[in-house]
Image (cartoon, grey):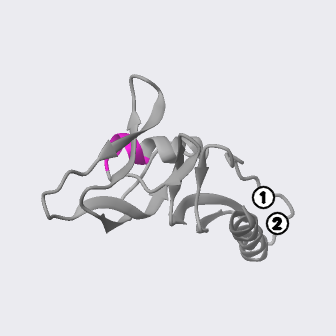
Amino acid sequence: MKTLALSLLAVLSTASVAAQSDIITLNSAVDTVSFDKAEVELFDKDGVFSASSTTYYGPKVWVNGRLQSFFVGSTNGNQFCEERGHNQEISGSTIKCGEDESSYANYDWYGKSWTYKSTGSKNQCYQLYATIKCQ
């Protein structure tokens, strides 16, 4: 939680300096998702700044009381972004590989919750989000 608070403080400080604005609003979904740090890209239109996209580093979600990395996929990506107050995931996310015989988070769209999904043991790269870019 300390890292989350420091990351948000860094984002707010960076956004405030770049935008030279007193008002920055971020959706606080602290209880559903987590991340190590975030970079906010600002768009300037006639002197009015707005966030055009946000990249989250080390994204994780809560599953049964534990923070977990989650599988790459449109449902998972969009759900993470929606829980942060964005519309959707956009191009620009990066991946890392998960390990064999492990479990990671996967969003169950029908059940409307994050659940565990096993990787199995196929000796391959199980794609997880290293960063996720939302708009």
Is 100 on the left or on the right of 103, as rendered? left
Which three-letter amino acid code belongs to the residue tagged 1?
Ile
The answer to whether marks 1 and 2 mark residues whose Cβ atoms lie closer than 8 Å is: yes
Q: Nearer the viewer, mark 1 or mark 2?
A: 1
> Which residue is at the far right?
22
| Position in image of residue 113 (x %, y %) | 48, 32
Q: Which residues are drawn in magenta? A: 73-77
Q: Residue furthest top?
A: 110
Element type where label 2 sits in the image: loop
Q: Report which quarter residue 124 is drawn in.
A: bottom left
Identified at 73% across, 73% down, the residue is: 10
Provide the residue designation for mark 2. Answer: 21
Residue at (43%, 23%) from the top-left corner?
A: 111
Q: Position of residue 65 (x, y in %)?
A: 59, 44
The quarter of the displayed image where residue 9 is located: bottom right
> Neighbour class for label 1 at 10 Å: few (<14), some, many (≥20)?
some
Q: Quarter of the image holding residue 22? A: bottom right
According to the picture, the residue beneath numbered tag 1 turns out to be 24
Can you see residue 62?
yes
State the CA–CA distance, disc 1 to disc 2.
7 Å
Instruction: Count the marks.
Output: 2
Amino acid marked by disc 2: Ser
**Mark 1 element type:** loop
Towards the viewer: 45 or 131:
131
In terms of secondary structure, what is the magenta stretch mainly? Answer: helix
At 61% from the left and 43% from the top, the residue drawn is: 32
Q: Is 7 placed left or right of 91 in the picture? A: right
Residue 129 falls within the magenta-colored stretch: no
Estimate the x, y position of residue 91 in percent, counting from the top left. 36, 59
User: Is residue 32 shown left or right of residue 118?
Assistant: right
